[in-house]
Image: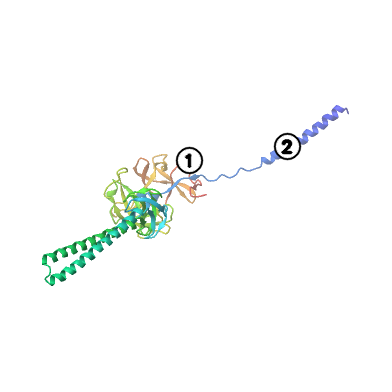
Amino acid sequence: MSLRRRRSKVVGAALAALFALTSLPLAGCGKEEAPAQKAPVVKTQQAGKASLGEESYSGTVKGRYETNLSFQVGGQILSRRVEEGSRVQAGETLMVIDARDAVQKANAGDAQVSQAKAQLNLAQSNLARYTELYHQDVVPKATLDQYQTNYDAAFANYQAALSQAAQGHNVLSYTNLTAGADGVISSLSAEEGQVVAAGQTVAVLVQTNELEVEIAVPEDKVAALQPGMEAAVTFWALKGAVRGVVREISPAAEQASRTYKVRVSLPQPPQGMQLGMTASVAFAPAAEGAESTGFELPLAAIYQTGEQPQVWVVEDGRVHLKNISVKQFGKTSVIVEGLSAHDLVVTAGVQKLREGEEVRTEAEP
């Protein structure tokens, strides 16, 4: 056998072995199975959460009593001992302003009291002396009347000096801004070194012993509300609903929003409720003794291929069509009948679903 023929056989055997090795992983890859796809996620809404006639408003937890704090005298703030959100006790000092002028005024008042007291003592001594002389028929009645008048004037000046001195000491006490009740500092509008005027608001104190929810009601809905009306109040950060009672309705609308402020008190507030929390206040249907006969859904929830409108309802993780009747159309919503309050209705992507298809809701992993 020639050298050329032997070389070609060796090369052929090597190529065959290489082909066999490279074909093994390819064959293995062909046997791998594709991973199972998860059920699609659908957006849903419980029908009973938007029943016909029910009015729901978002609001904020606020204190029933909110006090604007200010100094009764003007001056420069020397120290501020609280921050926004600080809890304070009644009588606690919050801020202090420069008291040097108040101290001088108090000292001046005390000096006037001493001077008036000396004048009163002199007038009293003169009156006693001339009273004795009058009884001895040494001086006439007119002279005695003159010294009686001097005593009365000195006594009046002394009383006036006492009042001015007390006012000076009051001004000195006004240089300390104290909390009038237990509560939380919700806002601050003054810093150390700032010069403030008498009556200028420097902080807001919210008393936390009685919290309530404030909502804004449109002018076309406020007539349906009245003090004492009950409502269901829920909180975004808390579980469950609590009973609320309309306590106050503003007599005038806000200039910008044209809505009326309504305060809803909470006889039994939930545990964990804090100032500033977001709340939802829902009122019962306005009709007397009538229950909700329809449910409000987004227009995108309606599925219709023929004359019969339907919606997709999620039951046990699968979707099923349910016949409904449309009662009223809105701009972005529709009022329907034929559902129960516990039905979980798909509100988006209804054209892509199939009867009995397995789905996941947004709350599921």
Of the numbered discs in the image, which one, if any, rests on residue 27? none
Which residue is pictured at 81% across the width and 31% down the height? 11
Which residue is pictured at 84% across the width and 29% down the height? 7
Tell me: residue 319, above or below residue 141. Answer: above
Give the x, y percent position of residue 143. Answer: 13, 65
Q: Are marks 1 and 2 in contact (CB under 8 Å)?
A: no
Residue that protrudes farthest toward the right in the picture: 1
Residue that protrudes farthest toward the bottom in the picture: 136
Which residue is pictured at 11% across the width and 67% down the height? 141
Visible in this render: residue 41?
Answer: yes
**Depth check: 210 or 37 in front?**
210
Q: Secondary structure at mark 1?
A: helix
| CA distance separating discs 1 and 2 | 44 Å
Q: Earlier in the sequence, mark 1 or mark 2?
A: 2
Give the x, y percent position of residue 262. Answer: 31, 51
- To which residue does mark 2 refer? 22
Q: Left or right: 147 with respect to 226? A: left
- To which residue does mark 1 refer? 352
Amino acid tagged 1: Lys
Give the x, y percent position of residue 128. Answer: 18, 69
Give the colouring mode of the picture: rainbow
How many other residues sit within 10 Å of disc 2, few (<14), some (14-19) or many (≥20)? few
Which residue is pictured at 70% across the width and 40% down the height? 25
**Depth check: 326 or 17 in front?**
17
Q: Secondary structure at mark 2?
A: helix
Q: How many marks?
A: 2
